[in-house]
Amino acid sequence: MTDLEEPEVEILRKSVIKHFQDLEDPRVGSRKAHSLVAIITIAILAILSGAEGFVGIETYGKAKQEWLETFVEIPNGIPSHDTFGRVLSQLEPEELNHSFLDWIGSITEKLNLELIHVDGKTAKGSYDRESKLKALHSVSAWSSEHGLVLAQQKVQSKSNEITAVPLLLKLVNFKGAVVTLDAMGTQREIAQQIKQGQGDYVLALKGNHPRLNQQVKTWFKQAQAQHWQGIDYSYNRTTESGHHRLETREVWAVPVNQLPSLHRQSQWLGLTTVVMVCTHRQLWNKTTTEVRFYISSLEADAQWHNQVIRSHWSIENSLHWVLDVTFKEDASRVRQGHGAENLGLLRRLSVNLLKREPSKQSLKMKRYRAGIDNSFLMKILSASVAES
């Protein structure tokens, strides 16, 4: 090993190897041509460098074999794409998720997580009509301030996000943070779980709670008609322009004690505020208005609610869009065993690592550069190595 290679070995030891070396190997028997840690290490480096599937991972490995051999034990060469596929389809997602959480936890323990957004995503390409296999659907917890996926939880095929969200929240330390969810996550049990975990919530209110939704909607309509006379409330207005449109957001936050008793109000632990958001979008050819309602455990501060609610949609733009456009997740046809779920987790890990690297390049350009510049790939990993 040369002096030039030693820093690379140390970076790998403190990052990939440290967090994935204790994975339980799903393969039965003593004859294993390739170690599990070598398979996972090559897969992570390949995905960071632009690989989109198992063939891409093998191709990357073969192109980089001489370099990889300086820090990964691969006496039998680079595994085939079938081997990568077979092992990742057999590996228990809970095992991989534990290593993922261990690494992300080492990053976030010194960060102040103020906002955590929860939303679901479907990997459309994982659907298989012939095998009657539903597309993989998972929910993720996202930190908008730091651009980090904090956790992922698969939605079971015969269930929905309502059962997956509580499992996801068990994986995340949200003490002191605000957790936002869309209407599917607006459940009394979830609100209780967040408050008991010493967090706060802002939950979208729609037709899945028709009576409560109608009460809040009617009250706001009456309050506006009476010009808010005698009502204690907070108001905030923002205007943004870009992409050939002008968007104005008006937010009213009202203490819940200003309203008549709401349907099952006492069952919503910590319910403090109701919120109305009116969004006016002026396009070149039309103007649209959208009105949305929320329930919240935060104090009635319209400016803060505007920021929190606005930030929730970053999970669509900064995570889901990136996974589909930059990582081609929707186009992936991986279906066997746990393959789609485990690849999805490695993609989300890659998003985290790429975003932690401080250069101003796009994620697409970072992946391209990582594929041709080994030192830059090491720089990506070193940016997510916790200080000893």
Image: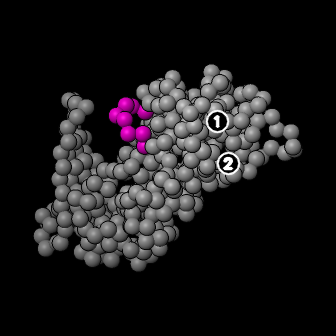
Mark drawn on residue 18: none
* Residue sitting at x 63%, y 38%: 41
Mark drawn on residue 21: 2
Crowdedness of circle 1 by 10 Å Cα count: few (<14), some, many (20+)? some
Crowdedness of circle 2 by 10 Å Cα count: few (<14), some, many (20+)? some
Q: Secondary structure at mark 2?
A: loop
Rendered location of residue 104, percent (x, y): 51, 52
| 63 vs 148: above or below | above
Mark 2 or mark 1: which is in front? 1
Q: Are marks 2 and 1 in contact (CB under 8 Å)?
A: no
Q: Point out the stretch of residues depicted in magenta.
A: 356-364
Q: Is residue 336 left or right of residue 203?
A: right
Q: Is residue 363 magenta?
A: yes
Q: Nearer the viewer, residue 64 or 47?
A: 64
| 300 vs 65: above or below | below
| Residue 61: quadrant of the picture | top right
- From mark 2 to mark 1, how far is it between C-alphas? 14 Å
Which corner quadrant holds the N terminus?
top right
Mark 1 or mark 2, which is nearer the start of the sequence? 2
Q: Secondary structure at mark 1?
A: loop
Q: Is residue 280 left or right of residue 40?
A: left
Q: Is residue 168 magenta?
A: no
Residue type at mark 1 is: Phe
Rendered location of residue 86, percent (x, y): 75, 36
Mark drawn on residue 71: 1
Residue type at mark 2 is: Gln
Q: Nearer the viewer, residue 283 or 84?
A: 84
Rendered location of residue 167, percent (x, y): 58, 60
| 225 vs 88: above or below | below
* Residue sitting at x 67%, y 30%: 69
* Residue sitting at x 45%, y 63%: 174
| Residue 245: quadrant of the picture | top left
